């Protein structure tokens, strides 16, 4: 499980990170809103632990609001010294999934994270996938961008679905061959390059921002950023 901790207080961050690592999590720590927003938006996490008050112009609520604007459904646990009912409601309405006031016991933090992960797992089989304004209807096997239907062949849809499920991650040729073509070896053809080119024409041409990117020497990635 990957957890992003965005917390400017070093002692609090160490307390959280050490406990999560002992519980088997892979943890990354950011101490300001700028780096926190970049990592939350660009990478895939199982859960984000987010301080409500951060130094600079980007606070915790701005980060979670931006994540939801980007259709990032990652569970977010907001931490805050602001304990009033109005502040808790504000945090949840901004897109947070839970709100824990400081000081807190790590056992309660861990219990809340586990509850968020269970809730998230229940929604993993949702009938729709999103990135930016691109929607995949998994039941009808149909794609739309900006509410415009995009005609895809079955293999193109499988390719796009795999990329969207791994949005923000570099996907290699080997991964695509195994997942989409069910090859467990590289047949040394340009089939992937051809299909990627066709898919890019269909989902990106005439739309903004471009979503399908080639990562030179590595593979491909679906992302709202270059």
Image: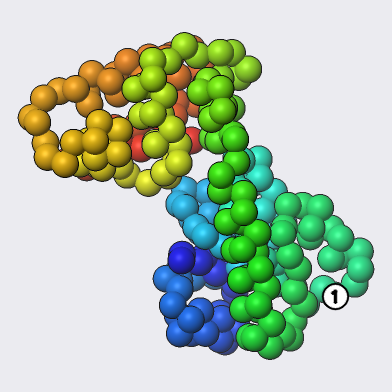
For residue 73, side relative to residue 217 (left or right): right
Q: How would you rate the neighbour count of disc 1 (Cα within 10 Å): few for under 14, some for 14-19, many for 20 or more?
A: few
Q: Which picture quadrant has residue 147?
A: top right
Q: Nearer the viewer, residue 175 or 211?
A: 175
Q: Residue at x 86, y 65 (%)?
A: 87
* Residue 103 location (% of width, % of height): 74, 86
Q: Residue furthest right?
A: 85
User: Could you say which is closer to the camera, residue 114 or residue 20?
Assistant: 114
Rendered location of residue 150, percent (x, y): 50, 14
Relative to 88, is 165 above or below? above
Tell me the quarter of the image containing the C terminus.
top left
Query: Number of labelled discs?
Result: 1
The residue that label 1 is drawn on is: 83
As drawn, 39 above or below 171: below
Q: Residue at x 72, y 59 (%)?
A: 97
Q: Quadrant of residue 16 in the image?
A: bottom right
Q: Name the residue at 85% across, 75% down.
A: 83
């Amino acid at each position: 499980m990957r957890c992003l901790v965005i917390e400017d207080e070093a002692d609090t961050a160490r307390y959280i990170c050490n406990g999560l690592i002992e519980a088997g999590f892979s943890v990354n720590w950011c101490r300001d809103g700028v780096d926190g927003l970049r990592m939350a938006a660009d990478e895939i996490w199982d859960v984000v632990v987010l301080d409500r008050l951060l130094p600079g112009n980007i606070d915790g609520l701005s980060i979670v609001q931006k994540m939801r604007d980007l259709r990032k459904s990652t569970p977010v646990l907001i931490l805050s010294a602001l304990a009033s009912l109005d502040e808790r409601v504000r945090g949840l309405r901004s897109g947070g999934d839970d709100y824990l006031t400081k000081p807190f016991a790590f056992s309660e933090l861990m219990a809340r994270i586990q509850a968020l992960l269970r809730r998230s797992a229940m929604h993993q089989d949702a009938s729709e996938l999103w990135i930016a304004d691109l929607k995949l209807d998994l039941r009808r096997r149909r794609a739309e961008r900006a509410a415009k239907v995009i005609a895809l062949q079955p293999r193109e849809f499988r390719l796009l679905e795999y990329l969207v499920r791994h949005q923000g991650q570099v996907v290699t040729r080997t991964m695509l061959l195994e997942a989409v073509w069910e090859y467990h070896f590289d047949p040394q053809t340009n089939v992937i390059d051809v299909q990627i080119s066709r898919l890019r024409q269909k989902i990106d041409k005439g739309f903004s921002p471009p979503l399908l990117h080639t990562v030179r020497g590595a593979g491909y990635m679906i992302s709202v950023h270059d």
